[in-house]
Amino acid sequence: LPRSRAWKPGRLPAQVLVDNSFNRTQVGTVLTGLVEQGTVKVGDVLQLGPDSCGRFQAVTLAGIQVKRVNVFEVAAGTTAAFAVQPELCSEGLAELPASGT
């Protein structure tokens, strides 16, 4: 990524660009991607989508890993893996609702 990128970790709603999804035994659905703005933490409810019909689905972050190390939260500019519930498989954009967590 370009060093000149202006990451936005402040009070903006979190936005994560999801680039991969897969399922792991005893974990469930795992999404990987880049946090583009804001901060996300374990327990946050994100809106995943849009799907082919333009809808979003609420998912809860059950866990976060950065370079295979469990972390509680990640800020803009970080690439991470996110265990989500309920189980699903989808690619797209995840962002926090405008109302907050």
Image (spheres, rainbow, N blue to C red):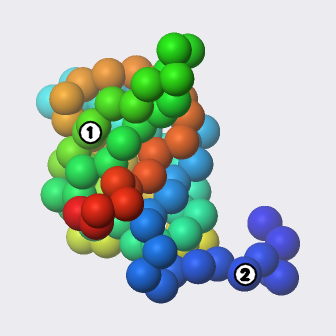
The residue depicted at 84 percent of the width and 72 percent of the height is: 2
The residue depicted at 26 percent of the width and 39 percent of the height is: 59
Please identify the quadrant where the N terminus is shown. Answer: bottom right
- Residue picked out by circle 2: 6
How far apart, in angstroms, are the residues tagged by discs 1 and 2? 27 Å
- Residue picked out by circle 1: 59
Instruction: Place residue 19 in its image quadrant.
Output: top right
Secondary structure beneath dot 2 equals loop
Position above or below: 36 against 24: below
Amino acid type of the residue that numbered disc 1 sits on in the rendered structure? Val
Q: Residues within 10 Å of mark 1 (few under 14, many from 20)?
A: some
Left or right: where does residue 15 sit relative to residue 42? right
**Which residue is situated farthest in the top direction here?**
53
Left or right: where does residue 33 sit relative to residue 99? right
Q: Is residue 93 visible?
A: yes
Residue 37: percent from left, percent from top: 55, 69
**Mark count:** 2
The residue depicted at 43 percent of the width and 67 percent of the height is: 13
